[in-house]
Amino acid sequence: MLTKKYILPFFLTISLQFIVISFCTAQWYDPEKVNKKAGDIYGQAINEGVAGNYDAAIRYLNESIKLDPKLVDAYISKAAIYGTLKKYDSSITGYEQAFALDSVYSKDYLLPYSISLAGTGKFQLALDAVNKFLTDEKLNKKSIAAGNFRKTTYEFALNYDKTHPVKNYVFAPQNLGDSINSSALEYYPSLTIDGSKMVFTRRINSDEDFYESNFADGKWSKAKPLAGKVNTNFNEGAQCISQDGQWIIFAGCNYPEGQGECDLYISYKTKNGWSEAENLGPMVNTDFWESSPSLSPDKRDLYFSSAVAGGFGGRDIWVTHRSLTGKWSRPENLGAAVNTSGDESCPFMHADNETLYFNSNGRPGYGSTDLFFTKKVSDTSWLEAENLGYPINTIDDEGSLIVAADAKTAYYASDRADGKGGLDLYTFQMREDIRPLKTLWVSGKVFDKKTMAGLPSSVELINLKTRNTISKIQTDEEGNYLATLPVGKDYAFNVNRRGYLFYSDNFALDANTADSVFHKDIPLQPLEAGAFIVLKNIFFDTKKFDLKPESIAELDKVVLLLNDNPKLRIEIDGHTDNVGLAKDNLTLSNNRAKAVVDYLSGKGIAPARLSFKGFGATKPMADNTTDTGKSQNRRTELSVISN
């Protein structure tokens, strides 16, 4: 389940293929006339290179060059090996040394030379080199196709730079260090919303298991295997930890009870560690391959990659929805804005519940599997996916990427030169134009106001402008909850439980909102006479009593409450601050309360169940000498008359 592909060296293969061709295209250089001892050592280098012993091959090549500084094939072979090792600067040097010695003999290597140039981000030079390569009239169809493919990728890169001008952005991935990375392979990071816990996959030999590390005092703790029963003798990988740190969903391969080769499983955090994993069942898993799950922050949507039939081709990204009863729905394809005839995998839904990152080899890009992002328009609609650009994407395969709640700190796996061994985990700062929404969060406990007992409840977050539900989460059995709050929007925050008066609050989060973490313990009042709440999402313009559109979401909650409780009778009370004449404030508050009742009546609620009254500034909740106090006093209340 590795997201990086490890294949036999492409560059070295090209070099060895072209060596035979080059013998008959020599200018002054003649391979038959090289120093015999140098030629023998060169032969040893080729044998080591074919066997994959690249360090030994380089040593032999350097020895042969010392004996014969004009051994062009040795420079070409060094360049090919360095290209295979992704040491593109050294590869470029080797090719250019060969070109300087004999440009005619070496011209067949302009294609791999261009690839090494692109590997360092020199796309214009790469395009020049491949264009020169394609002028050779003796090229076969395969070479022409390979050259044209690379030409397309270089042109894409140059055009991307033109259409995505960036100033002062530095891509500088930092290795997460010895606490997380080891001589084994580490990949597929996942993070809780507060950034305090990272769970990732570590592969030792052929066994994959989950490890965790905690962030405290500015550093990561020494990673250790997850406690409990989630790690087994089978392969667990491509995991996603829920934003609240309570669930892990992952791909389990070759499990005895599995539907297919790789299925999706879930494990729950318990007092004794992580529970034994449960298969998500035949509604989600198929006889095909399912992997790389990503859970939405409200734990209601699960995105994953599957090779199941019925998609756009290859592996597609699908989503399944979790009902209030805990059942997962039949998966839905994310559509053509995301999926292609190629392979899409490694989806990551950010904490904003809107921005989805994934990788694909089916879209224009830099040559292999690139990273992309899209934005959710609705439950069934997505914006056309966009490439993340160079240098996040390179000419090589890119795997999974996640972005922290701050919207700028990203984590991914890479086999960079400064790694501890194979794939390591790195962090870097995202470019501003490809960031999701910075996301804060609110957590707390819902409880019965009278008994103080925790109440399992529904917590809903609604965009006041669009009236779309951003998230709808279920508390745990003790009433604990965590809800994410993407900045830049205004939200209605409602908590509901049958038999209780719902709770109302709002969050107005502009783009400059401080990195605050909200904590709200929420007392719910039983539906009985005397219970009341402030409807915090009822809005009017100054000195007016026309309901603003942002009020509709909250008003509809009141309609739902009344419909669910047909005997319930309520009173709507209007209140103002002390600005202006008392008589005017009394009239204004009365008219505002009436406007709410009129809306409810218009939705079919019997007038006999509704009453209203305006109190002006006679019942302040706070001090009227401050703006904050005045804002609190301007309010609409709902009181229970009888039930």
Image (spheres, rainbow, N blue to C red):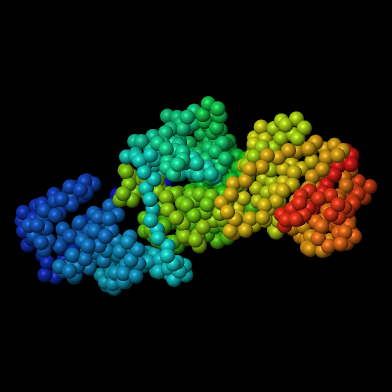
Q: Is residue 615 left or right of residue 67?
A: right
Residue at coordinates 53% horizontally, 44% vertically from top-left? 194
Q: Quadrant of residue 170?
A: bottom left
Q: Is residue 76 left or right of residue 486?
A: left
The foreground one among 370 and 170 is 170
Q: Position of residue 599 (x, y in %)?
A: 85, 55
Residue 339 visible, this orientation: no
Q: Position of residue 638 (x, y in %)?
A: 83, 47
Q: Is residue 33 left or right of residue 150?
A: left
Q: Quadrant of residue 206?
A: top left
The foreground one among 600 and 591 is 591
Q: Is residue 167 left or right of residue 241?
A: left
Q: Position of residue 618 (x, y in %)?
A: 86, 52
Q: Say if 127 sits above or below 279 in the image.
A: below
Residue at coordinates 50% horizontally, 41% vertically from top-left? 196
Residue 447 visible, this orientation: yes
Q: Say if 187 sits above or below 85 in the image.
A: above
Q: Residue furthest left?
A: 36
Residue at coordinates 68% horizontally, 39% vertically from top-left? 521
Q: Position of residue 65 (x, y in %)?
A: 11, 58
**Number of marks present in the image shown:** 0
Of the 4 image quadrants, the one containing the C terminus is top right
Residue at coordinates 24% horizontally, 59% vertically from top-left? 91
Q: Residue furthest right?
A: 608
Q: Residue furthest top?
A: 272
Of the 4 image quadrants, the one containing the N terminus is top left
